[in-house]
Image (cartoon, helix red, strand yellow):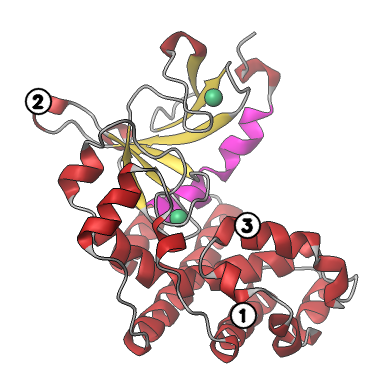
């Protein structure tokens, strides 16, 4: 991620945020900084080659996540180091209850990481998270440490390890192929296979008008996507898609889909007075999740 952009976006949001929102933004700004610094360290140490341009483009067009073809080797000791760092940061800065904070600090991360399937983490991240959740009871974690927080540490750590590879792989697919695949754009992340976290609609450029992209928070990839399409199930039936926004803020909208009953959070750059940074937007748009559950924002 681009830390300068993160800082600029956070500063701009904080200038008009409530105290609690500002604290939340500061927390994530610190987390992103740790993640990026760790990703840079790992990138320097890794000799990751990715795929040939031919293979990368063929997989992209075939909608096969590229990381499965060229997995990242995640070293146990190094992943332990990342988890430890992130857990410490969460314990000190996430405003957790005392019992949770202590439980988080008492986890033997080395032992815990030894039980994770890191080969799966480096090739199929969403499956890795799912499998880890399924096996969580066998990990000997104190019941005081909630699964959600522990797995948050794991997911935040994983991004540091796969982001450099994701950047390399996405760079091996030419812009031309990514912008105009032969059939359709990937619905899930073309690199790691995770569902999109959120969507961005860029300011109009050239004759193509506004272009839409999907953002994956698992690996950081941002890829082109159809403007009128459900980001969850992929339907292109525009009459089944509805858009809502909270009063006074047209830059953040929900795309609701009648076909699958799900929604996606979208940010519209032209209505945004703040530099567009998807990591920060993901934090800011968390409030849209609450809106999405409000029956007034669901089309019948
Ligand atoms: Zn991804
Ligand atoms: Zn849908």
Question: Ligand 1: does it lie within 8 Å of the C-beta at label 1?
Answer: no
Q: Is residue 101 above or below residue 218?
A: below
Quadrant where the image shows the N terminus = bottom left
Residue at 72% of width from left, 65% of height from top? 132
Q: Is residue 285 magenta?
A: yes
Q: Are marks 2 and 3 in contact (CB under 8 Å)?
A: no
Position in image of residue 73 (x %, y %) = 48, 79
Is residue 199 shown to the viewer in this render?
yes
Q: Please tell me whether the stretch drawn in magenta is mainly helix, strand or loop.
A: helix
Q: Which mark is residue 83?
A: 1
Q: Name which quarter of the figure residue 3 lies in.
A: bottom left
Residue range corresponding to the magenta coloring? 278-293
Residue at 41% of width from left, 59% of height from top? 220
Q: Is residue 276 magenta?
A: no
Determine which residue is flagged by label 2.
207
Q: Secondary structure at mark 1?
A: helix
Q: Secondary structure at mark 3?
A: helix
Q: Which mark is residue 127?
A: 3
Q: Real-space Cα distance between discs 2 and 3? A: 40 Å
Question: Ligand 1: does it lie within 8 Å of the C-beta at label 3?
Answer: no
Q: Is residue 65 above or below residue 237?
A: below
Position in image of residue 131 (x %, y %) = 72, 61
Q: Real-space Cα distance between discs 1 and 2? A: 46 Å
Q: Name which quarter of the figure residue 52 lies in.
A: bottom left
Residue at 69% of width from left, 77% of height from top? 91
Earlier residue among tags 1 and 2: 1
Position in image of residue 194 (x %, y %) = 52, 50
Earlier residue among tags 2 and 3: 3
Answer with left or right where residue 182 lies relative to residue 16: left
Q: Real-space Cα distance between discs 1 and 3? A: 19 Å
Answer with left or right where residue 207 lies relative to residue 163: left
Q: Which mark is residue 278?
A: none
């Amino acid at each position: 991620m681009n830390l300068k952009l993160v800082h600029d976006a956070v500063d701009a949001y904080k200038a008009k945020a409530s105290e609690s929102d500002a604290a939340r933004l500061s927390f994530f700004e610190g987390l992103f900084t740790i993640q990026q610094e760790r990703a840079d360290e790992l990138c320097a140490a890794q000799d990751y080659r990715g795929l040939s341009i031919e293979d990368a483009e063929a997989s992209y067009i075939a909608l096969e996540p590229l990381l499965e073809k060229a997995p990242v080797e995640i070293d146990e000791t190094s992943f332990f180091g990342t988890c430890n760092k992130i857990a410490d940061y969460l314990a000190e800065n996430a405003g957790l209850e005392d019992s949770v904070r202590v439980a988080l600090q008492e986890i033997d991360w080395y032992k815990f990481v030894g039980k994770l399937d890191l080969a799966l983490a480096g090739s199929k991240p969403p499956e890795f998270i799912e499998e880890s959740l399924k096996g969580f009871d066998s990990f000997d974690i104190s019941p005081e440490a909630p699964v959600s927080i522990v797995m948050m540490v794991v997911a935040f750590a994983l991004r540091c390890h796969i982001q450099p590879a994701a950047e390399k792989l996405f760079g091996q697919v030419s812009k031309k192929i990514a912008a105009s695949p032969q059939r359709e754009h990937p619905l899930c992340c073309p690199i790691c296979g995770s569902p999109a976290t959120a969507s961005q609609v860029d300011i109009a450029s050239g004759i193509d008008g506004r272009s839409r992209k999907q953002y994956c928070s698992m690996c950081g990839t941002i890829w082109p996507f159809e403007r009128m399409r459900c980001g969850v199930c992929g339907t292109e039936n525009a009459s089944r898609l509805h858009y809502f926004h909270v009063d006074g803020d047209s830059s953040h909208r929900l795309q609701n889909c009648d076909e699958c009953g799900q929604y996606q959070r979208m940010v519209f750059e032209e209505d945004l007075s703040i530099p567009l940074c998807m990591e920060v937007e993901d934090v800011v748009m968390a409030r849209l999740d609450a809106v999405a559950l409000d029956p007034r924002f669901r089309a019948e």
